[in-house]
Image: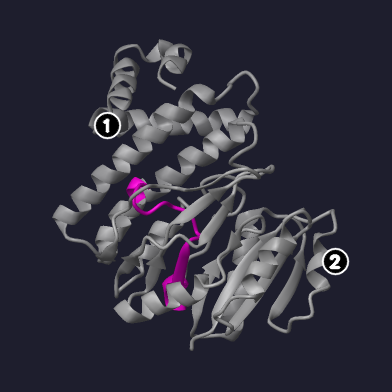
Amino acid sequence: MEKIFVIIPCYNCEKTIVRCLDSVIKQTYENLEIICVNDGSTDNTNKLIADYNDKRIHLINKNNGGVSSARNTGLDFIFKKNKDGLIAFVDADDFLDLDYFQTLSETLKKYNVDICCCSFKYETKILSYPCKTKIDTGLFSSFEATNLLVKDSTIQSHSHCKLFKMNVWNGVRFPEGIIMMEDQATLFKVFYNSNNGIYITDYCGYHYWQEGSSACRSEMTNKKVLDSIFGYLESYKFNFDKYSIDQQNLIKQSSIDALSGVYLMMFPRFSSKNATQTENKTFKEFKTFIKENKIINKSRPSSRKEKNKKRVYLIMRPFYKYIYNLFS
């Protein structure tokens, strides 16, 4: 039974950390090492974790640096002392079915893959519902799974809902300083490192809490707009020299489609009037990159709404920002 290292970034999560940790320590799969990274919390998060009498829990306290910094701290802690094992990420406001790690580890071992992906349920105080009614399941090569991940459809770009062999994280860390789409900017590199493929199961044992003040659910800001575009730019710019020319063309098209989609969605939300000098400069660089590489022109929208967005942007670019709400 391989050890599973569970990384939990924790920031001001006193209302949910006990539920989260209880769901981890009570797993039917007991060979766990639980790394709780307290990212400068100012509430009772630190005390609630420290009160647990479980030798499998490691509490690391650090200054606030964001979720990427906290996850990287956990990864560095693991790699400093270990060469083998499995890695999983759990957010501090989420929780797991008690057979979560048992199910994922058995699936990973059965198909001898490097990564096992599962589905999840959205949770609120009154509702619980699956993220999708149907997903594609089965065994996928590194390229096939990376292409699906870039599309962010069958395999969504969350770091949770996945169990990884430790080796695929060699040389890969989350980009620090961004508050959105840090997974999108990272996981395709992890999938690229897979030599034995990825298995997708429709098992739905992860519960994704939808109430609170996470970066994704709070008010949109210029910072979030820029981070979102950056995440998709990273996958577009990545050098997939491991793949054949045909595969490179296919995954590049997927990257173009994804980048075009997020740009057309985020572009109208950027406020140059309220932006800092650095934000305006970064946004101008993004706009130039999109234009010079003809990202919107080359994209292949998957719906009528997206086709209309593209058409309006290309024909009436100066007015797109003002009529965007017609398509949202």
161 drawn magenta: yes
Which residue is label 1 attached to? Answer: 301
Q: Which residues are magenta?
A: 150-170
**Mark 2 belongs to which amino acid?**
Lys
When the figure is inspected, residue 119 is found, relative to residue 115, above or below; the finding is: above
Q: Using a 10 Å C-alpha cutoff, classify the residue at mark 1 as few (fewer than 14 neighbours), some (14 to 19) or many (20 or more).
A: some
Q: Is residue 226 above or below residue 315?
A: below
Q: Which mark is residue 47?
A: 2
Residue 300, percent across and down? 24, 33
Check the image and report above or below for 119 versus 21: above
> Which SS class for mark 1?
loop
Instruction: State the residue at coordinates (76%, 64%).
Output: 62
Residue type, label 1: Pro
Q: Find residue 267 and report its horizontal and vertical position in percent.
A: 47, 26
Q: CA distance from mark 1 to mark 2?
A: 49 Å
- The residue at the far left in this view is 246
Instruction: Depth check: give the residue in front, 326 or 318.
Output: 326
Which corner quadrant holds the C terminus? top left
